[in-house]
Image (spheres, rainbow, N blue to C red):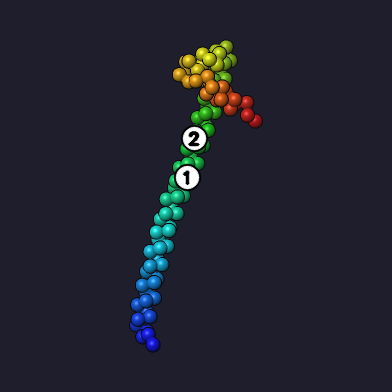
Amino acid sequence: MVSQTLRQQARRQVNEATATRKRVWAEREARLVDAAVEIVAAIVARDRAELAAAQAILAMADERVSLTEIGERCALPLKEVVRLKKLRARP
């Protein structure tokens, strides 16, 4: 029969290994949460910036500047100017 002392040592060893696994998992989970927050924040910032660009495009268009000229002035392809302009048309 295994002595009580050996059982206690084995229990401590298993508990330490379990604690290490849990700590590693928690650290990884925290890194993943931080990365997810960065992703969402970047997407929100991008969306806000694109809406601001779309408003500026509309303001220039109101000044009777063609989309082609807006693209030239901003060094953007016409396709990008059109895409941004359409953002303001969304509900």
Taking the image as shown, residue 56 lies to the left or right of residue 12, namely: right
> Residue 7: horizontal and vertical position, in percent?
38, 80
Q: Residue at x 48, y 15 (%)?
A: 72
Residue found farthest to the right:
91
Which amino acid, mark 2? Ala
Quadrant for the N terminus in the image:
bottom left
User: Crowdedness of circle 2 by 10 Å Cα count: few (<14), some, many (20+)?
Assistant: few
Residue wearing tag 1: 37
On screen, residue 36 above or below 15:
above
Q: Based on the displayed image, in which of its 4 quarters is residue 82 positioned?
A: top right
Mark on residue 65? none
Picture quadrant where residue 2 is located? bottom left
Count of numbered labels shown in the rendering: 2
Give how far across and how far down residue 69 sits, in percent: 51, 13
Q: Secondary structure at mark 2?
A: helix
- Residue 16 lies, with reference to residue 29, above or below; the image says below
- Mark 1 packing: few (<14 Cα in 10 Å), some, or many (20+)? few
Q: Is residue 3 above or below residue 83?
A: below
Indicate the quadrant containing the C terminus: top left, top right, bottom left or bottom right.
top right
**Callout 1 secondary element:** helix
Give the residue displayed 45% in from the left and 19% down from the top: 75
Three-letter amino acid code at the position of disc 1: Val
Residue 61 on image: x %, y %: 57, 16
Q: Residue at x 53, y 33 (%)?
A: 47
Q: Earlier in the sequence, mark 1 or mark 2?
A: 1
Cβ atoms at labels 1 and 2 below 8 Å apart: no
Q: Is residue 63 visible?
A: no
Residue 16 against residue 61 in the figure, above or below: below
Which residue position holds label 2?
Answer: 45
Residue at image position (58%, 15%) is 62
Mark 1–mark 2 Cα distance, whole angstroms, equals 12 Å
